[in-house]
Image (spheres, rainbow, N blue to C red):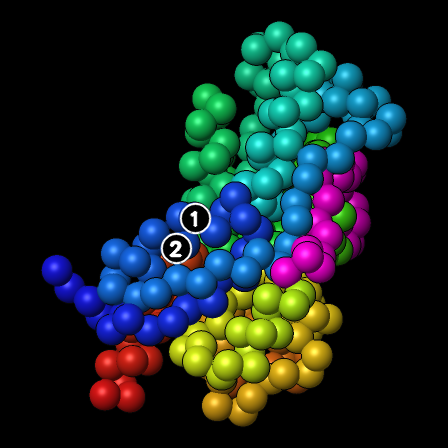
Amino acid sequence: MSVPLHEKRILITREENQAKEFSEKVKQHGGKPIEIPLLKISCKDKLENKQLLENIHHYKWIFFTSSNGVVCFFQFAKQYKWMSNVLDKIKFATVGHKTAQTLEAYGYKADFIPSIYNADAMATEFTEKYTVVDEPLLIVRGNKSREVLPEWLTKHEICFDVLEVYETMYNFRVEEELNQLLNQNKLDFITFTSPSAVEAFSEMSNGQIRKNQVFVCIGTTTKKRALELGITNTLTPEQFTIDGMLEQIIDYIARKG
């Protein structure tokens, strides 16, 4: 069995339910995953959401900016007892293939996926491909999502609504455990799969950012937030996925010999 991670200790900071897949992949490559979920994610319902969802048939496109958005969207669909044909005439855009796979689990396929998995590419490539856009659009997202997509659509005078279906909060119950781990200084890599994870780490780590510590960011948006918060020793994969992150770590280990 190949062990390219050589039992390296890799901190996984993503939300608890999503951490398992990452941990299994680390184990498969011979690494030692340590799960400290810095975030808590929960579906969020409110009156405005109900009103938007009751009129879902008016939208021509639905944009999903994360897998969490897909899961919570269909949770509410079930809650409101939609007929299955309500979404049949709507097209779907997803921020990446992972989000598209989550959508497929509910029986729908993405009509558009950007080549780079972030909101910037999603906005620019969509308007390049669809020079004439059927309106209105619906953006399904969480409370900490960036404003890139809404701002871009506004700039191009495209009619849209925003549906916040989940809430991301800091998981302060792991703060003590995180700092004990950082004090031991035995982590080989710390991974971030969102800007929110970087912010949570910065909030809870009591400034424990050692110069020799290697951080791995899933994409350029997450890396940018890390740099803004003083985390400079970062790796970022070409493909913004956890597989890409692991490949980047493996390449880094090989280069260091």
Q: Nearer the viewer, residue 251 or 7?
A: 7
Q: Position of residue 20 (x, y in %)?
A: 43, 48
Report whether 62 appears left or right of 154: left
Q: Position of residue 172 (x, y in %)?
A: 71, 59
Q: Nearer the viewer, residue 202 or 112?
A: 202
Q: CA distance from mark 2 to mark 1?
A: 5 Å
Residue at the extreme left of the image, as rendered: 1
Residue appearing at x 58%, y 74% in the figure: 180
Residue at the extreme bottom of the image, as rendered: 211
Report whether 92 appears left or right of 167: left
Q: Nearer the viewer, residue 155 or 148?
A: 148
Residues shaded magenta: 150-174
213 drawn magenta: no
Q: Position of residue 58 (x, y in %)?
A: 73, 21
Would you call the spot at circle 1 few (<14 residues within 10 Å), some (14-19), or many (20 or more)?
A: some
Q: Which mark is residue 118?
A: none
Residue 155: image quadrant is bottom right
Q: Amino acid at mark 1?
A: Lys
Mark 2 and mark 1 in contact? Answer it, CB < 8 Å: yes
Residue appearing at x 75%, y 35% in the figure: 44
Tell me if residue 21 comes above or below residue 229 in the rendering: above
Q: Amino acid at mark 2?
A: Ser
Residue 253 visible in rendering: yes
Give the labeled residue for mark 2.
23
Secondary structure at numbered mark 2: helix
Residue appearing at x 70%, y 79% in the figure: 206
Q: Position of residue 199 (x, y in %)?
A: 69, 68
Residue 129 visible in rendering: no
Secondary structure at numbered mark 1: helix
Would you call the spot at circle 2 few (<14 residues within 10 Å), some (14-19), or many (20 or more)?
A: some
Q: Quadrant of the C terminus?
A: bottom left
Give the labeled residue for mark 1.
20
